[in-house]
Amino acid sequence: MRVVVHTDDADTWCQALARRLPDAEVVTSEAAGDAPADYLAVWKPPASLFEGQSRLKGIVNLGAGVDALLHNPGLPRGVPIVKLRDAGMAPLMADYVRFGVLYFQRDFDRYFAQQTHGTWREQPLIDKADWPIGVLGLGAIGAHVARALAEDGFPVHGWSRSAKSLDGVTCHHGEAGLSELLAGVRTLVTLLPDTDSTRGIVNAGTLSRLPEGATLINPGRGSLIDEAALLDALGPGDKEGRLRGALLDAFTEEPLPRDNPLWAHPRVRITPHMAAPTPVRDAADQVAELIRALDAGEDVETIDPGAGY
Ligand code: NDP
């Protein structure tokens, strides 16, 4: 069996996979030459990687979001695609979202703004129980984050495409469920995939349904957010708008262009798509197991290209 790996840090991945698949030949795309692969393990591969792949039996996406892969013009039809599910990313994401929630709930945004004027003023404490959070997307990562926040003592509402039941989380689905969720949350967390039905889901209409002073955390995908509507809801830099602030990790164009107004907005915090990098050690176990199961003809949950995630 030949496994070709294409990602940053492909050497580390090859070593990790070779240890877990001792009967396989595991090589980087650079070293692979023209010989075709049985399995590709990839993150954002060039379209040319798919050329001449005459015996491909499966593609493993080395991340949770498959949007880049599904938009790849070279992607062959009919080859099963699998993606990472949690694989160590969910706890990292929970840390990121916790940071964001506490940043607003404990008023760090206001304290850091006060610091620029040398103002010593304690803000009134708001109890976690009075800080409802909405998590859009209850997948492998979203569900973990929702549960973690609920365990921390926040009332948590989650939203997904299909109906779900999660301990400690009030679950919603469908359009009516979204309206119900939006009306009552102080922080909205977006952990949806980028698909035709989620693109621009946080738009002027969505933002206007959030309570005054709500906050946004987007580690999902940049395309979920209508940036112009977000800036409008945030209002001018010197006065809190309807939306109090935003913590953003993912953007439509990455790196975020230097002239994007989000960089300069005083109530926007920006991180460079670092919320939950794929941890090679945990993920390699899952990738090796997926390849083994695909090769053994076992039932494996594959991506539905129609749904887009
Ligand atoms: P999953 O694919 O496991 O889950 C996606 C969730 O979104 C599911 O609950 C699904 O509903 C829901 N969903 C999809 N479409 C809709 C829709 N139209 N309406 C309502 N709900 C919908 O994803 P993960 O939880 O693993 O990851 C979520 C996203 O986080 C990834 O797609 C990726 O974009 C992003 N990510 C970002 C990282 C970063 O570092 N910034 C790192 C890792 C991931 P249902 O359950 O009904 O199918």
Image: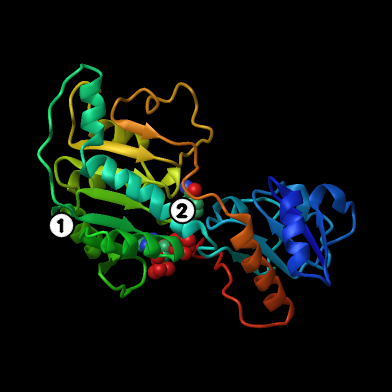
User: Quadrant holding ligand 1?
Assistant: bottom left
Of 116 and 185, nearer the camera is 116
Amino acid type, label 1: Ala
Residue 5 horizontal/vertical position (percent): 75, 55
Residue 261 horizontal/vertical position (percent): 38, 24
Q: What is the secondary structure assignment of the residue under circle 1?
A: helix
Would you say 171 lies left or right of 45 here?
Answer: left
Q: Which mark is residue 92?
A: 2
Question: What coloring was used for the rendering?
Answer: rainbow
Residue 104 horizontal/vertical position (percent): 24, 41
Badge 2 crowding class, 10 Å Cα cut-off, few under 14, some 14 to 19, many 20 or more, is some
Distance between the alpha carbons at the discs numbered 1 and 2:
24 Å
Badge 1 crowding class, 10 Å Cα cut-off, few under 14, some 14 to 19, many 20 or more, is few
In the displayed image of the protein, which residue is found farthest to the left?
124
Q: Can residue 39 be spotted in the picture?
A: no
Q: Does the closest atom of ligand 1 sit within 8 Å of the Cβ of label 2?
A: yes
| Above or below 11: residue 264 | above
Amino acid type, label 2: Leu
Residue displayed at 12% across by 32% down: 122
Of 280 and 50, nearer the camera is 280
